[in-house]
């Protein structure tokens, strides 16, 4: 939406626009915080479940993933600062228009879902529980089959 106003995807072209487009800045900030896994957002639920499951099975890979989560959060917060909260140093940004009612109407339901799924994920998780359990069972069977094959080939040598 901001691209349509500015026609640039370069972070350097956007410094400080939160002062000019506060509604957009609010939406972008909440979506960014969800993306980095802030508790109370859908991103937290997703990252938490993946990391807990990973730590139980392959802790060293989960540790690498956790470091990746931290590094990506640092990058995203840095990018958010440069886009929205740096000093407004480009005169062309002073004339940007904030979101209109149609754009707010498109984004508001997404914001609602981000918060709702972060606070109460049960309806979504319960719908996928059976297929997730089936997937875990298939992975465990395949891993057991591979171990048996490796044991048999090691014993035959």
Image (cartoon, helix red, strand yellow):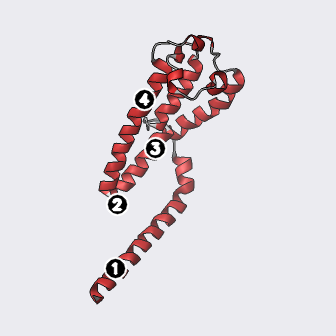
Please report the residue visible at 53 percent of the width from the left and 17 percent of the height from the top.
18
Q: Quadrant of residue 108?
A: top right
- Nearest to the eye among marks 3 and 2: give it: 2
Please report the residue visible at 58 percent of the width from the left and 32 percent of the height from the top.
111
In percent of width and height, residue 93 lies at: 58, 14
Q: Which residue is mark 4?
A: 77
In percent of width and height, residue 7 lies at: 64, 25
Please report the residue visible at 41 percent of the width from the left and 28 percent of the height from the top.
78
Q: Quadrant of residue 37?
A: top left
Tag of residue 140: none
Q: Nearer the viewer, residue 89 or 49?
A: 89
Tag of residue 150: 1
Do the numbered discs 1 and 2 sit on residues whose CB atoms are within 8 Å?
A: no
Q: Which residue is mark 2?
A: 57
User: How packed is label 2: few (under 14 Cα within 10 Å), some, or many (20 or more)?
Assistant: few
Q: CA distance from mark 2 to mark 4?
A: 30 Å
Q: CA distance from mark 1 to mark 2?
A: 19 Å
Give the mark nearest the N terminus, 1 or 3: 3
- Nearest to the eye among marks 1 and 2: give it: 1
Q: Secondary structure at mark 4?
A: helix
Q: Is residue 149 left or right of residue 83?
A: left
Tag of residue 45: 3
Q: Where 126 sits versus 106, above or below? A: below
Q: Where 134 sits versus 1, above or below? A: below
In percent of width and height, residue 154 lies at: 29, 83
């Amino acid at each position: 939406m901001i691209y349509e106003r500015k026609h640039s995807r370069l972070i350097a072209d956007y410094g400080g626009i939160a002062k000019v487009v506060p509604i957009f800045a609010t939406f972008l900030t909440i979506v960014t915080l969800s993306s980095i896994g802030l508790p109370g957002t859908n991103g937290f639920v997703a990252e938490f479940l993946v990391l807990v499951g990973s730590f139980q099975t392959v802790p060293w890979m989960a540790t690498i993933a956790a470091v990746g989560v931290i590094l990506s959060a640092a990058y995203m917060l840095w990018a958010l600062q440069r886009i929205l909260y740096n000093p407004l140093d480009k005169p062309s940004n002073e004339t940007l228009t904030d979101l209109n009612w149609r754009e707010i109407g498109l984004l508001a339901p997404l914001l609602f879902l981000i918060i709702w799924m972060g606070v109460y994920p049960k309806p979504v998780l319960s719908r996928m529980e059976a297929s997730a359990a089936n997937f875990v069972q298939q992975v465990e069977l395949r891993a057991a089959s591979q171990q048996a094959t490796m044991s048999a080939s090691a014993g035959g040598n």
